Structure formats: C-alpha cells, structure tokens
Image (tube, rainbow, N blue to C red):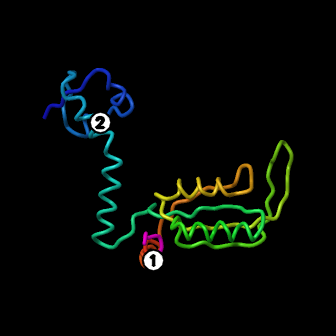
C-alpha cells in the first residue's frame, strides 16, 4: 500500500516517527493526495468520540467524560440558589448541590484573603459546560468567579440517563 505525502507534513513523522511502520505503509512525497491523509489523521479524535457516543446509545453503556461536575463558589446562599435555579430553568444542568459554608483562603491583589463561601456542584453535560460557564460569569457578582469542571469518569448508568432526561429541551 502506498500513500502520497507532501514534504510540508513531515512534522507529523517527526512527532511520531513510528507512524508509517505501524500502518505498514510506504510514503512517497507528493502533493496530490496529502489532504486525504491529513484529514484522516486530524479527524480521528472526533470520529472516535462519535463512535463511542453511538456505542453508548446502542448498548446503554456510559462513555467517560460525557457529563461533568462544575464547581462554583458563591458569596452567599441567595446568590447560590439564584444561579442554581436559573441553571436548571435554562436546561444547562440537571442537578445542583448547594454546600454551605466552605472556608476559602486565596490570593487577591497580592494579599491572602479569607472568606466563607457557598459551593455549588452543578451536574451537566460536558458539551454544555462552556455555555454554563459563560452564563455564570455573566450573572455572578465576583470579578473573577471560580468556575471549573471535572469530567465524570464512572457512575451508575441509570443516574446518567436521569441526568440526560433532566436536560432535555421541552
């Protein structure tokens, strides 16, 4: 089997020199079919994700990272409740835990500050984290709100199905 490979793409071979041997192919340096091989190489992560999601839908199994937990610190319980309720109303989340009185120590303007904050644990689809984060930055009173997420690696399939149903658009 022979693929055509242009000289401008030798960086991939430098990055992963065993690539041709793993595929058991011989590369010739030409510009004609470069786009096909480049597109295949670059689209692999997306195609893998889509195939895992399809497998998940067919078998009912969970694909790691489909859902995330978003952590948000709020200055008081009323603001935390307002953000939690709005996130649910907008279908940006399926569930929110409000954990009271988290003691926080942090640097702000070169000084160590100490505060009591309310921690939100927001369960959502990983695909909605960006929109949820943007919304929180818009309504949050802090100049730089603490908003970060961690993907859910494993869990109960029934719980994940419940999360999905909770974020379905009406």
Taking depth in this image into account, of 125 and 136 the one nearest to the observer is 136
Mark 2 against mark 1, which lies toward the viewer? 1
Q: How many numbered circles does the render carry? A: 2
**Residue 67 place in picture, x, y as percent:** 48, 64
The N terminus is located in which quarter? top left
On screen, residue 124 versus residue 157, left or right, reads right
Q: Which residues are magenta?
A: 166-170
Residue that badge 2 annotates:
19
Q: Quadrant of the C terminus?
A: bottom left
Q: Residue furthest front?
A: 170
Q: CA distance from mark 2 to mark 1?
A: 42 Å
Front one among 21 and 131: 131
Magenta segment main secondary structure = loop
> Any magenta on residue 169?
yes
Farthest residue, direction left: 1
Q: Residue at x 32, y 56 (%)?
A: 50
Badge 2 crowding class, 10 Å Cα cut-off, few under 14, some 14 to 19, many 20 or more, is few
Query: Can you tell which mark lies on residue 100?
Result: none
Q: Look at 20% across and 21% down and name the residue there.
A: 30
Circle 2: element type = helix
Residue 115: horizontal and vertical position, in percent? Answer: 83, 60
Percent position (x, y) of residue 168? 43, 70
Q: Nearer the viewer, residue 3 or 107?
A: 107
Asked whether residue 111 is drawn in magenta, I would say: no
Q: Is residue 77 above or below residue 112?
A: below
Q: Residue at x 29, y 20 (%)?
A: 7
Q: Residue 162: which disc?
A: 1
Q: Quadrant of residue 104?
A: bottom right
């Amino acid at each position: 089997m022979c693929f055509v490979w242009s000289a401008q793409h030798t960086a991939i071979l430098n990055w992963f020199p065993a690539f041709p041997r793993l595929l058991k192919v011989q590369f010739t340096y030409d510009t004609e079919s470069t786009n096909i091989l480049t597109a295949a190489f670059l689209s692999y992560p997306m195609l893998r994700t889509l195939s895992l999601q399809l497998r998940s839908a067919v078998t009912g199994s969970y694909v790691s990272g489909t859902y995330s937990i978003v952590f948000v610190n709020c200055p008081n319980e009323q603001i935390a409740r307002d953000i939690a309720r709005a996130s649910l109303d907008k279908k940006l989340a399926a569930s929110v835990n409000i954990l009271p009185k988290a003691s926080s120590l942090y640097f702000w303007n070169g000084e160590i500050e100490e505060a009591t904050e309310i921690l939100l644990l927001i369960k959502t689809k990983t695909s909605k984290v960006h929109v949820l984060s943007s919304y929180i930055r818009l309504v949050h009173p802090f100049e730089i709100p603490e908003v970060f997420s961690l993907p859910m690696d494993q869990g109960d399939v029934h719980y994940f199905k419940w999360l999905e149903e909770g974020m379905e658009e009406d």
